[in-house]
Structures are given as structure tokens and as C-alpha cells.
Amino acid sequence: MSRTLSEADSKAFLSEFNIPFATEVLVSTADEAVAAANAVGLPVAVKLCGEQISHKTERGLVRLGLSDSNSVHEAATALFAAAQPEDCATGVLVAPMISGARELIAGLSVDEQFGPTVLIGIGGILAEAIADVAVRLLPIAEVDAMDMLDQLQTQSLLDEFRGEPVVDRIAVGKVLLALSQIAAEHPEVLSIDLNPLIISDGQPIAVDALVEVQS
Amino acid sequence: MNQTVTSTAISTDQLDASFSALFEPRGILVAGASTHPGKFGFVSLHNVIASGYAGKIFATNLEGVEVLGIQTLPSLEELPQGAADLIFVCTPKSANLDLLRAAASKGVRAAFLTSAGYGEAGDQGRADEAELVELCQELGILLVGPNGQGVVSTPAKLCAQIVAPYPPEGGIGIASQSGNFVSSFMNWSCATGVGVSRAVSAGNAAATSVGDFLQMYSHDPATRVGLAYVEGVTDGRRFFDQMRAVAQKIPLVVIKGGATAGGAQAAASHTGSLANDDRTFDGACRQAGVTRAATVEEAFEAAATFATQPLPRGNKVVVMTTAGGWGVVTADAITRDHDLELIELPADLREAIDAYLPPRWSGSNPVDLAGGETRDTIPKVLELVASHPQVDAVVYLGIGIQSNQARMLSEGPFADEADVERIIAYHQRQDARFAQAAHDVSLATGKPILTATELAVAFGDNAGPATVRSTGRLCYSSADRAVTALGHMWRHSRYRILRDLPLIDGCPEAFLPTGNLLGGSVSSD
């Protein structure tokens, strides 16, 4: 049996391994959401947070690009109202909007034949169609992490792109090494999804994270 | 699942101890020799004799008749103690357990079983296979197969196989989960002249897997590169650890069947293999330093290149050509390979070449001689290019053109005229010289020089490609194929450089540079 940590718990766990996240605040009222939004800086995204929430996007439980106090209040109110008992909601997450034209995906999973693996790939809405990913068996060394980035076919996305600087490959490599370290220290972790890992000003920032653990 | 590449629990020490029994036996016993030329028991004995195997050859036959000039033994009782290390089994399954017991008592230490009806044949077959494995462990016999095609070892002139061919001697060690792939690789070896050290089809791999054979090859002085076909990997982690250990010692080229959904379905019905996530398999290969090839010719040519060229110390490539179009397409191929670099020709090199060519030569990379060459230009320019410190590898195009015309002249109505005769001989001499120069310069500089022309397949006896072949190297049938092989080579070099592994391990002694380049620094960019 396995269970999935809430987004907030996932991020708290992963942050200990220096996986980069934007500052986020978990709030329990719409007023707190507005205060948090002003503290982290507008525009923000607000999301319902809980252990059992599935189909977050399909159910409209993620609201992006809120640029003033009113819209934050309105959205947070709606999210609290939409929570179902089975969601086990713990609150609403308020996060600054991370802007970047490029999205990567990174993660950890257990292959039936090869055991624990780490993955990096091109993310975004076309990710599945592009299917540009690199996988390695764990543990990986720094040289493997760098080679994973070299293996991606869409290298032009990692160079200067639409006025944004080149991707900091070493910073992305550190995320992969962190995933390797987590697998070594926490064999109970079955999978990790960092999707998307937005490239903002050349730096990777994980915007959503899910950790699945053996229960 | 009846075939795996990882089912064994044989230790490295056991493998090394069994190696000579399988690949360099003092004597071989063909069990189940037959007088019928269509039977495995005839063909395998024939192939052992025909390949010139120098050890003692014994054979059994229930009636004790003479087969192919060999007086067969009706039972193993008459086999001299310790005279044969290897038994090649062509008997039906039911006879095998007693046969192996008797063989072990006479000192046999390795058994190759062609017999079918084991793991590939349902529950009963699987149970019989388990019994077979257990017995061989008990007897201390290395079990290969069952349901395999055979074993080849050119240093021992041994071709114990139920199929052709017997390849020329060389540095490629072949192991395959599918017998026909062994034949394919060896047919390529015959076609190109780049030879094989050992080859074995793992059959059902009941006790000894493809990975185990590769591990043996990595300790084998006769083997410079491993070449393997695998279809299903069950214990992926063990396979990975084994492949990584092998690739630290020798380059290893793998072609994997069942890489796509369609192929995986075909593999399931062929060997019962479970599908592997191909992205994971691919990543595991890169991580292990294994060269993965997509097609059989790409796999063979990569292995042949590792076996016959020194590893490049960097990715900077120069193309030398006698004709423009080829150079352009080759420049495309190099540029498409993200890991290779078609370098801008260094100014001092350009000036040095200027001294040997009229001004119409390209002046850039590709170095297009544009027909400006005279008698000694090609060897000289090759030497200048390859010795330049900023050049790591050379692709040489255009060899054999004049000898091709010489062929036409020699087959034409004016072949007997003195001038014609003289020019035929001159062209052939020149192309042979150029091919030899490519080899010599590669030896002197320790850098790979890959010669490509379709004349290698169109007219293999053309003095150009024929001389490339006589130097022991592969003459690539197109520049694209040469570039593909070079890309594989560089990626393996880079793997070694980035992990502080010596390049020399992957570099056959015969191809170590004769100059002082070995002591120089290794370029890693």
C-alpha cells in the first residue's frame, strides 16, 4: 500500500533536500490568503491542499495568475467551498506565480525490472507528445546528472530562449542528485513528481510536487 | 519466461575457471554424431573438423559407426580420462542427464546443449530444464544452452555450431540471446574481414547468460570489444551491474530486441521476454558506458570500429575528400551527431596544406582536394591533418576511384596496350598506398582514421578497400556509416574520460600510437 503526501507536506519534505521551491504559505481562511498573497508578492496562484485531492486541475482547484486582493479573496473562498470531505483538505496554498517560458519535469520512480530510477524531461502541455526524457538508475553521480541533460533531444530549449538566459544545468543537475539522495536515505519513497519544474530566469523552480510513500 | 539474460548465479571465479573448457578445450566430444548430412550431429562434427580445430575430436554414436572419418564411441566408457573438456550435445533430451554424468566422470567441464524441448516447451520442459541446471551444478559442468546454436573460438580454431559461418580471427566477442544473431554478426565479419574472437549463442540461457559470457570476454586477452544481442532483461539491476563492469574493461556494443511496442510483442512470442521500459534500458546503457545500436549493421560496425581503431581523445573531426559532394554530406552527418564537432580548419593547418595543393582546394573542413592532388599529396595531407593537435579523428573519402577505372580498363578491349597496362598498375598501386597511409598515420598518431567508400561493397577487390581490409580495418560502405561508428566511439571515450577511466583499456595494443602522444594530455571537450 502507498499513500501520497499533500502538496504542502511533499514540498516541506523535498525542501529539506534543497529542491528549490517558491515561498508558499498554507492558509486556512480567505483573509489569510490575501495577506499571504501580498506578503509573497502578486500575482499569485492559489490551490486547495490535502492528502487525497485528485484531479486538482480538472476540478478547478488551482487558480493561477491572481493579480489583486479581490481576486485572491474570491478564489480562496471558492476553493474552501469546493473542498469535499474525502479530499482531507488541510488548507489553501498561496504561491507567487513563477514565470518562465520553459518547463521541465523531474521525478523518481521504481521500475519493475531495474529498480529505483530518476527522470528528467521536457515538460509543458506538449510533454507527452514530445516524449523527450532521460532516465537513469539510482544512485547517480554528478557526471550522470549532467549526461541526462546532454541526452535530451531538444537541446535548443536549454540554451538562451525567448529572451531568457541559458538553463543553469548545474542547478538542474543538483535537483536530480537530490532525488538520488532521497531514494538512498528514504527507501519508503516510491515516487516523486516535480511537475512542472519551471525554468525562471535560468533557474529551476519546482512549482508542484507529489511524494508517494510506502504506508 | 524461459529465456533470461540474468538467471544465473554463477560467480566470476567460476566463469573464469570454466572459460578455457568452453573456448579453449583440449578436446571436444560431439555427442550424438550422425551419418545423415542433414542432422545437427553431422553438421556440428563437420564444422569442428572443417574449421581446423587442433585439439582431440571425439564423437559418440549409438551404433559406433564411423562418421566423417571419426571412429565414434558407442558409449563414453571408452573416452580417455581427461581428453575432452567440452561436450557438444546433439542427442535428444531424454539421453542428456546420463550423458552429462558420464561426461563429468571423464573430466568434461563444459557442455553446450543444442537439444530442444526444455524451457521453451511448456511446464514439463521447464521442470526438465531446472533438473538439468541442478545436475550440472552438482557435476561442476558449465552448462550453455540448451536450445542453442553453438560456440565459436577462433584462437582455438573451434567452430562447434549447427550452422555456418566460421568467421576470420579478430577481436570481437559475440554473445547473443538469439542464435541467428550470432550468425548475422559473423556473416558481417566474413563480409568485412573484421574478425571475431569468441561467439556463443546462449539459447535458453538456463544457467549461463549473455551477461556471463560478456563478463568472460572482459577478462579475455583475445577479445577487444563485446557485441551482444539481448531481448529480455528480467533482473535489470544485475544486468546493469554486469554490463557496467564489462564496459569498464572493454567497449561493449548492445542491440536490444523489443525496444518498441511492436517489437516487444514479437519478443514475447519469441523468447517469452517481458517488455522493458525502453527509456530505462537506454538510460542504463548510457550510465553503464554501453554503446547501444539500433540495427544489426550499426552494431557490427560499431564493434568493428572499437576493435580496429584507437579511441578518439576528443570530438574534433576533419573530413578529407577528393570530391566535394561527399564532403558536404559527411559534414551534415557530423553536424547532426550532437556529440561530434566538425571543426573549423586551424589556420596553421590550412597554410601547411596550401604548400601541397593548388589554390582551388577548399581551404576549409571538409578538406576537399578538388582534384588538385598529385602523386604524393594524399598521404602527405592525411599526415598533416591527423597530426595536428586540434584534430581528434579523420574521415577519409574518395579512395578507389582510379582503381575502379583501372578495372574498367582491364576488362575493356584495350587492356593489353602498354600505356593502359601501365596506368592500371599505377592506379592500383596508388590506391593501395593511400589505404596503407591511412592505417600508418593512424598508428603513428594514435587517432582514428575511418576510410569510407561504397566500392567496399560494389567491388570489394578494388585496391583501395582491399588494402584497408588487409590492414585489419573496416572500410565503411558510406561516410554516414563511418560517422555513426565514430560517434559511438567518441561517446565511449567521453564516458571514460569523464570518469577517469584509462582510454587504453579500450584501445587494442596494436593500435597504440607509436609516437609520444600517449604521454600527452587528454582532450575532453
Image (cartoon, rainbow, N blue to C red):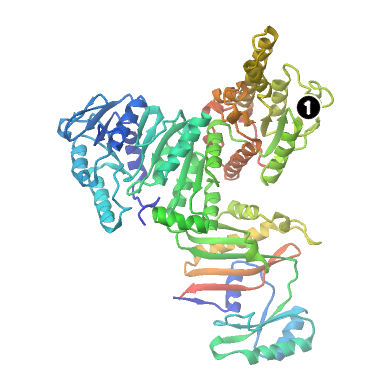
**Residue B382 higher or lower than A203, as above or below:** above
In the image, A1 versus B485, the foreground residue is B485
- Quadrant (top left/top right/bottom left/bottom right) for the C terminus of chain B: top right
B74 left or right of B179 in image: left
Decide which of B60, B445 is in the foreground and name it. B60
Q: Residue furthest right?
A: B359
Drawn side of residue B375 relative to residue B486, left or right: right
Q: Is residue B500 visible?
A: yes
Question: Label 1 sits on what residue type?
Answer: Ala
Question: In which quarter of the view is residue B360 placed?
Answer: top right
Q: Quadrant of residue B414?
A: top right
Image location (x, y in percent) of residue B2: 35, 54
Q: What crowding class fits label 1: few (fewer than 14 Cα within 10 Å), some (14-19), or many (20 or more)?
A: some
| Residue B177 falls left or right of residue A11 | left
- State the quadrant of the N terminus of chain B: bottom left
What secondary structure is marked by label 1? loop
Q: Is residue B453 above or below residue A135?
A: above
Taking the spot 62% from the left edge, 86% from the top edge, the residue there is A91
Query: Which residue: 46% across, 45% down?
Result: B229
B505 is higher (above) or lower (below) than B95:
above
Q: Residue furthest top?
A: B418
Considering depth in this image, is B408 or B269 the residue closer to the camera?
Answer: B408
The image position of residue B168, as x and y in percent, is 45, 28
User: Where residue B411 appears, x then y in whole percent?
Assistant: 62, 17
Left or right: A138 as drawn, with respect to B180: right
Residue at image mark 1: B370
Q: Residue at x 52, y 65 (%)?
A: A109
